[in-house]
Amino acid sequence: MRTYKILMLGLLLSVVSCSIDEQVDPNAPSLNSVLKDASITELNLLATGIEGFMRNGFGTYVTSTGSIARELYIFDADPRNTEDLLGKDGMPLDNNTFYLTTPYNNFYRDIKTCNILLESIDNTDNPTQAEKDGYRGFANTIKAFKLFQVLTMLNDNGIRVDVADPNNLGPFLSKADAFRAIRELLDDAQGQLNGSTFAFQLSAGFAGFDTPATFSQFNRAIAARVALYAKDYLGALSALDGSFFDLMGDFKTGPKHVFSTNSGDILNPAFKTPNQSGDQLVVHNDLIADAQAGDDRLNKFALRTNQTTLDGLAGSHETRLYASATSSMDIIRNEELILIYAEGKIQTDMLGDAADALDIIRTGHSLPAYSGPMTKEALIDEMLYNRRYSFWGEGHRMFDMRRYDRLNDQFLPIDRAGDQIFTQFPIPLTEGQ
């Protein structure tokens, strides 16, 4: 497994917010040099850094959104995990603390690296035109993906999309305008990938998606997810046509984040040692109680030797989602694409097709075929059930519930009197909004 080189070429990419100017070390002029007449080697190191940095902040994104959605709890020494994120005694979310700033800053740092690569491509004659388009299609796809992740967090607060010039940042766009910009960027990237060449190598996590043609399938998979969240269901179904969606295919197919113990690399941030007394990723008890008999997705959870409690909360089960600290994490997989297809069919009133797709998911997880009412409302419930268990602990539940106006105490449990449920994260303090 290849080790990612995150701190490469002496580039000072530690921008802690997109509103803070980039700092250039006069003793390390590599940033200026790579922005003008960069070599293939330098461009490839940037591409490697972009892929590696995709992972940073994702663990906090998963646990903070999962806590808000009451699918999991983090029991550790930091009280903010059981206080702030659950709105204890009416407490609001903090706009200047780790559960917001860690993913936000890291996602924009990766966007910054994408922008550096894009600028470098414009200012060098070393790659061929086909290779330049390969870099552009790759960088713009990842840039759009990270912007989308920021938007899922801030939601109606909107996000900055134009951040290429730290001295002249673009405005916060509305949610609708941000979705539009992200989707246009994905479409532009798809066009750039068409007929291009990759002069760089991706990690083993992108095996099978490491050529322009197959990476374009990843691009369309992300485009389908974005369209779904934007409630453009026909657009989501259309994007699936160009993706790696396979109704009868392996659920697990898709690119992944990979980890290792190699020097300079990082470990899977969501892995927890079984039955440890501290730093626990606890399954909300409702996940166990609400599961249908025989659902093999319960294998993601394990009964603790002793029930664990903290701050008035309790849990009998803990995560077994990942076997070890070097287990890979899915970025997007065919199982999600099948459920995007099912949701798109429900929302476009093709209920038979939707039920057939949901049956593929159900029988693939040791459940009998769907036997409930063939109504739109009932199939939405069935689709959300399957998304709940298929994607537990992967950063989906908060946004699935919000998309269907269920991110409230009518649909989610309140485990302590005085707790509240949040629908979005605030704009970070450093943005000065």
Image (cartoon, grey):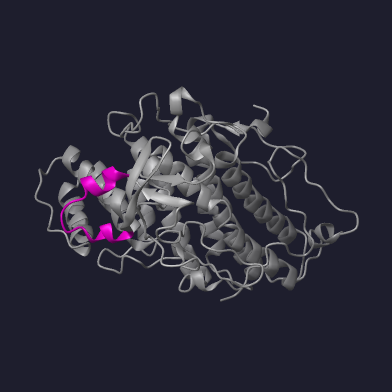
Is residue 328 found left or right of 121 in the rendered image?
Answer: left
Quadrant in which the N terminus appears: bottom right
Whole-percent x and y of residue 216?
A: 48, 63
Q: Would you say the magenta stretch is mainly helix, strand or loop? A: helix
Q: Is residue 123 above or below residue 371?
A: below
Residue 139 image point, x, y percent:
61, 58
| Frontmost residue, 76 versus 236 | 76
Between residue 251 and residue 94, name the one nearer to us: 94
x 33%, y 57%: residue: 305
Residue 297 picture location, percent across and down: 27, 58
Point 46% across, 49% down: residue? 62
User: Depth check: 197 or 107 in front?
Assistant: 107
Chain part drawn in magenta: 284-300
Instruction: Name the side, left or right, on which 262 lies relative to 419.
Output: right
Q: Position of residue 196 (x, y in %)?
A: 57, 69
> Which residue extends farthest right?
27
Q: Is residue 345 among what the camera can see?
A: no
The reply to whether residue 65 is in sight is: yes
The C terminus lies in which quarter of the figure? top right
Is 290 contained in the magenta span? yes
